[in-house]
Image (cartoon, helix red, strand yellow):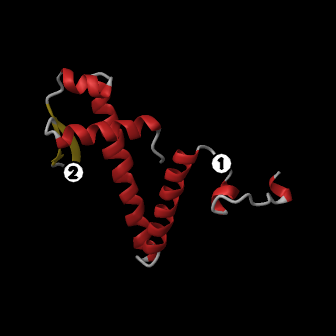
């Protein structure tokens, strides 16, 4: 699952509030365990996230206990079936994708062919027009 712009903004705000010790993440034991967001949900948190307390809880649950943990479940499943020999390829590809996204944010929208050609216009194959 891909993160939305709202998810990214939420994570950036959450990081800021965790660094200032207004919020923290704890592991809630159980079967299965899950992460919970702790701290005061006062006016400062409401202003930072611009959503209700319940909205903050929902987005935290969605991002951390569903998206983040599910990504690791997928990795564990794939590595159980194929071993860890593909891990380095996956890490390299994900770093390349991240770098391309960062470049696209700085330069604005461009064709994938332009990005792949390091900024040079690359002829679009006839079947892609």
Residue 24 at x, y percent in the picture:
17, 41
Closest to the observer, 31 or 106: 106
Q: Which residue is mark 2?
A: 31
Query: Vertically, is 104 above or below 62?
Result: below
Q: Residue furthest right?
A: 126
Question: What residue is at 15 percent from the left and 35 percent from the top?
Answer: 22
Number of dots carrying numbers = 2
Is residue 10 in view?
yes
Residue 79: image tag: none
Residue 107 at x, y percent in the picture:
57, 47
Distance of label 2 from label 1 (alpha carbons): 46 Å
Is residue 24 in view?
no
Dot 2 and dot 1 residues touching (CB under 8 Å)? no
Provide the secondary structure element on which disc 2 rests: loop
Q: Which residue is mark 1?
A: 110
Which quarter of the picture shows residue 125? bottom right
Closest to the observer, 22 or 30: 22
Provide the secondary structure element on which disc 1 rests: loop
Badge nearest the viewer, 2 or 1: 1
- Left or right: residue 105 compared with residue 33: right
- Left or right: residue 100 compared with residue 27: right
Q: Residues within 10 Å of mark 2 (few under 14, many from 20)?
A: few
Question: What residue is at 26 percent from the left and 42 percent from the top?
Answer: 15
Q: Earlier in the sequence, mark 2 or mark 1?
A: 2
Closest to the observer, 126 or 79: 126
Question: What residue is at 25 percent from the left and 23 percent from the top?
Answer: 46
Question: What residue is at 32 percent from the left and 40 percent from the top?
Answer: 12
Query: Vertically, is 47 above or below 91?
Result: above
Closest to the observer, 92 or 116: 116
Q: Residues within 10 Å of mark 1 (few under 14, many from 20)?
A: few
Residue 116 at x, y percent in the picture:
64, 62
């Amino acid at each position: 699952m891909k993160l939305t712009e709202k998810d990214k903004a939420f994570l950036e705000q959450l990081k800021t509030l965790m660094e200032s010790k207004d919020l923290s993440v704890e592991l809630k034991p159980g079967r299965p365990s899950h992460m919970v967001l702790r701290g005061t949900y006062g006016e400062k948190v409401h202003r930072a996230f611009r959503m209700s307390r319940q909205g903050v809880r929902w987005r935290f649950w969605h991002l951390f206990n569903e998206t983040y943990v599910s990504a690791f479940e997928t990795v564990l499943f794939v590595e159980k079936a194929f071993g860890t020999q593909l891990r380095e390829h996956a890490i390299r590809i994900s770093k390349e994708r991240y770098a391309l996204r960062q470049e696209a944010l700085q330069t604005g929208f461009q064709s994938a062919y332009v990005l792949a050609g390091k900024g040079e216009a690359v002829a679009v194959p006839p079947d892609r027009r």
